[in-house]
Image (cartoon, coloured by chain):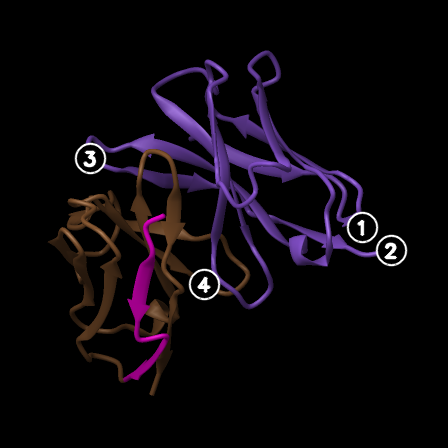
Amino acid sequence: DIQMTQSPSSLSASVGDRVTITCQASQDISNYLNWYQQKPGKAPKLLIYDASNLETGVPSRFSGSGSGTDFTFTISSLQPEDIATYYCQQYDNLLITFGQGTRLEIK
Amino acid sequence: QVQLQESGPGLVKPSQTLSLTCTVSGGSISSGSYYWSWIRQPAGKGLEWIGRIYTSGSTNYNPSLKSRVTISVDTSKNQFSLKLSSVTAADTAVYYCARDADYGGSNAFDIWGQGTMVTVSS
């Protein structure tokens, strides 16, 4: 099984800060990596697919990069509405797994 | 636009079978190249993919749950369903259905239901 290690598990930042979350796969997954935002009591929302592609309608302050085993998710300028938990997710044709999540709070 | 809605009992007794249905509205479950997945999330914890089905009926399951899971599709009703047998308290979670779309590289869950809470308790 491909394991996803996401860090940090929680993060506190100020409005306007640049925020970075990382996700590491236990083996090469090419660019088969997606990022989701989940607000309390809500279903997750797809933000980034194939490691670096912005889903339609998602603000451009969100971005992703990486390939192989190491991936990064960035919010260029944190906004109050970005408070949520963020998950990476890898796609293997036989088993889909998520990272443990990063809870993002406003400082 | 396409929307998903989960339905089913909110309380299941230990050792019994959990049964949920996801109804697809705003589009045909058979149109396009989509898988249809079930994902769950225990309170305060992360997301766990349970399995998925293609409209042809082919399925993939999480190996950790495979022995207890059955996912089926009813294209005439625009629904797909989850059955999880021999449940224990560890199966208590919010259960989501989601559309699993081919983005050319990976697949991603682009549309989600609102989720339904299922508690396993006697």
Which of the two marks, 1 or 4, is nearer to us in this view?
A: 1
CB within 8 Å, label 2 to label 1: yes
Q: Quick check: is A26 in the magenta stretch?
A: no
Q: Which residue is mark 1?
A: B14
Q: Which residue is mark 3?
A: B105
**Is the residue at mark 2 from the same chain as the one at mark 1?**
yes
* Residue A59 drawn above or below residue B61: below
Q: Nearer the viewer, residue B61 or B114?
A: B61
Q: Which residues are magenta?
A: A1-13
Going 38% across and 25% down the picture, which residue do you hit? B34
**Mark number for residue B122?**
2
Q: Earlier in the sequence, mark 2 or mark 1?
A: 1
Q: Earlier in the sequence, mark 2 or mark 3?
A: 3
Which SS type dominates the magenta stretch? strand
**Is the residue at mark 4 from the same chain as the one at mark 3?**
no
| Residue A7 in sight | yes
Going 20% across and 79% down the picture, which residue do you hit? A16
**Quarter of the image where one finds residue B18:** top right
**Mark number for residue A39?**
4
Q: Nearer the viewer, residue B85 or B92?
A: B85
Total of numbered circles in the picture? 4
- Quadrant into which the N terminus of chain B falls: top left
Q: Secondary structure at mark 2?
A: loop
Q: Chain of mark 1?
A: B
Shade of chain B as shown in the rendered figure: purple
Label 4 Cα neighbours within 10 Å, binned few <14 / some 14-19 / many ≥20: some
Q: Chain of mark 3?
A: B
Q: Mark 3 and mark 1: span between their CA atoms?
A: 40 Å
Residue A103 shown left or right of residue B106 in the figure: right
Q: Mark 1 and mark 4: span between their CA atoms?
A: 30 Å
